[in-house]
Amino acid sequence: GHFFKQYDTFAAAHHKAVECLSSSSFKEFVLKCQHSEEAEVSGGADFKTLLIGPVQRVMRYRMLLQSLADNTEPDHPDHAELQSALATINVACDHVNEHVRKTENKEKIMEVAAKLTGLPAGFSMLQEGRTLVKEGVLSKVCRKTNKPFHVVLCNDVLIYGSRY
């Protein structure tokens, strides 16, 4: 399992790397690289395609090992080792997916927290175990006119206000 730990950070930061692709200076750099002699190394694949490769690799290992295990007879000498390898890769894949999910949740909460004003002193949106469930506008039904409220729902707290 420890061989796959490096995928955590890479997979969690993958979407940030993809965002960098939209910056004009990075686009210029990529174009320059694509037109150089070294571009042959990539086999013609664009940078975004190359960037997702390591993230997809672990998942492909899982599919390959699952296929091998499914097609290996239980009495085959490699059966036990295949089952062990499959268990290891399943743990690694689950770990990577969970790390990515937590990182994305933290970034969403930070994004929402940056919009909020007037929170009580000492209150922090970033709390261990807090997950963002939903954010949006709800209308409070009143006698004369409905009033819109901005609402942030987390697993442990509900925040609402008249505006961001």
Image (cartoon, rainbow, N blue to C red):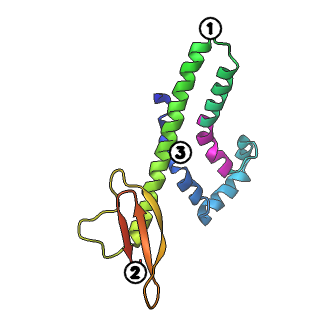
Labels 3 and 1 touching (C-beta < 8 A): no
**Residue wearing tag 1:** 77
Mark 2 surroundings within 10 Å by alpha-carbon count, few (fewer than 14), some (14 through 19), many (20 or more): few
Q: Tell me the distance, in whole angstroms, between the alpha carbons under discs 3 and 2.
A: 37 Å
The mark closer to the camera, 1 or 2, is 2
69 relative position to 104: left or right: right
**Mark 3 = which residue?**
11
The image quarter containing residue 30 is bottom right
Question: 155 above or below 76?
Answer: below
Q: Along the horizontal axis of the image, is 107 left or right of 40?
A: left
Type of amino acid under label 3:
Ala
Location of residue 54 (image quadrant): top right
Residue 74 place in picture, x, y as percent: 64, 12
Q: Residue at left 36%, top 50%?
A: 129
Q: Residue at x 57, y 14 (%)?
A: 80
* Residue assigned mark 2: 162
Q: Nearer the viewer, mark 3 or mark 2?
A: 2
Q: Residues within 10 Å of mark 3 (few under 14, many from 20)?
A: many
Give the residues in magenta: 48-58
